[in-house]
């Protein structure tokens, strides 16, 4: 259960009601600080709509962060969003297998993106070897956007966990299809 009440658009001053264009639990918590939510939406909007990073690779990186953090909200939301950008059930299964050290069938770019997201999430930085290998698949702008995406979503999962934001009922089916392990990564 969330640590603060969820706010609705009607709870907000008129100048902040635009922040609730998407009626999701995350925004309904973050809007307790309209300035923070506005800044959050700015970077999140760039990542989703402005970046030249391949959207499938972006979503795989975000899913990797959500999986490692055991963040049900992030995991379920980005399974749904990932489907919209070309992520398949086979990709999600491969992500899980790869993360758990089992053989996985991934294209080289996807495997490196997942490895880079794991390294950054677990060690605080991507290794030089992974960074160098990614340069064969991504240009400099895309590589920076990948790193910013991974870092941003590492922040998002910490916000979700600290505020104990609930998964909306319509996203539960994604957790049923691809449950998160209960043990820490």
Image (cartoon, rainbow, N blue to C red):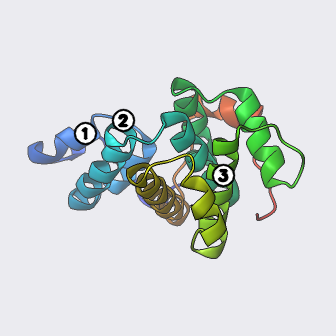
Residue 18 percent coordinates (x, y):
19, 39
Q: Secondary structure at mark 2?
A: loop
Of the numbered discs 1 and 2, the one sitting upstream in the chain is 1
Residue 141 percent coordinates (x, y):
38, 52
Residue at 25% of width from left, 39% of height from top?
Answer: 9
Alpha carbons under labels 1 and 3: distance apart = 41 Å
Quadrant for residue 157, please give it: bottom right
Relative to 7, is 111 on the left or the right? right
Relative to 7, is 128 on the left or the right? right
How many other residues sit within 10 Å of disc 2, few (<14), some (14-19) or many (≥20)?
Answer: few
- Confirm or deny contact between disc 1 and disc 2 (CB under 8 A): yes
Look at the image and tell me in which quarter the N terminus lies.
bottom right
The residue at the far front in this view is 136
Residue 179 in view, yes or no: no
Q: Which residue is mark 1?
A: 9
Quadrant for residue 171, please give it: top right
Alpha carbons under labels 2 and 3: distance apart = 34 Å
Residue at 32% of width from left, 52% of height from top?
Answer: 43
Answer above or below: position of 87 versus 44.
Answer: above
Relative to 126, is 4 on the left or the right? left
Answer above or below: position of 23 versus 31.
Answer: above
Labelled disc at residue 112: 3
Q: Secondary structure at mark 1?
A: helix
- Confirm or deny contact between disc 1 and disc 3 (CB under 8 A): no
Of the numbered discs 1 and 3, the one sitting upstream in the chain is 1
Look at the image and tell me in which quarter the C terminus lies.
bottom right
How many other residues sit within 10 Å of disc 3, few (<14), some (14-19) or many (≥20)?
Answer: some
Query: In this view of the protein, which residue sits in the foreground, 31 or 84?
Result: 84
Of tags 2 and 3, which is closer to the observer? 3
Labelled disc at residue 23: 2
Residue 92 percent coordinates (x, y):
72, 37
């Amino acid at each position: 259960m969330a640590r603060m009440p969820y706010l609705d658009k009607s709870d907000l001053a008129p100048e902040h009601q635009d922040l609730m264009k998407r009626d999701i639990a995350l925004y309904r918590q973050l809007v307790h600080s309209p300035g923070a939510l506005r800044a959050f939406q700015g970077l999140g909007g760039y990542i989703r709509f402005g970046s030249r990073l391949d959207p499938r690779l972006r979503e795989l990186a975000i899913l990797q962060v959500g999986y490692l953090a055991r963040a049900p909200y992030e995991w379920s939301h980005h399974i749904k969003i990932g489907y919209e950008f070309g992520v398949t059930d086979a990709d999600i299964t491969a992500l899980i297998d790869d993360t758990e050290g089992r053989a996985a069938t991934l294209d080289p770019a996807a495997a490196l993106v997942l490895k880079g997201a794991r390294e950054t999430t677990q060690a605080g930085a991507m290794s030089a070897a992974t960074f160098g290998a990614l340069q064969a698949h991504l240009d400099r702008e895309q590589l920076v956007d990948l790193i910013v995406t991974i870092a941003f979503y590492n922040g998002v999962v910490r916000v979700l966990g600290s505020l104990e934001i609930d998964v909306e009922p319509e996203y539960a089916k994604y957790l049923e299809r691809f449950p998160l392990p209960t043990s820490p990564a």
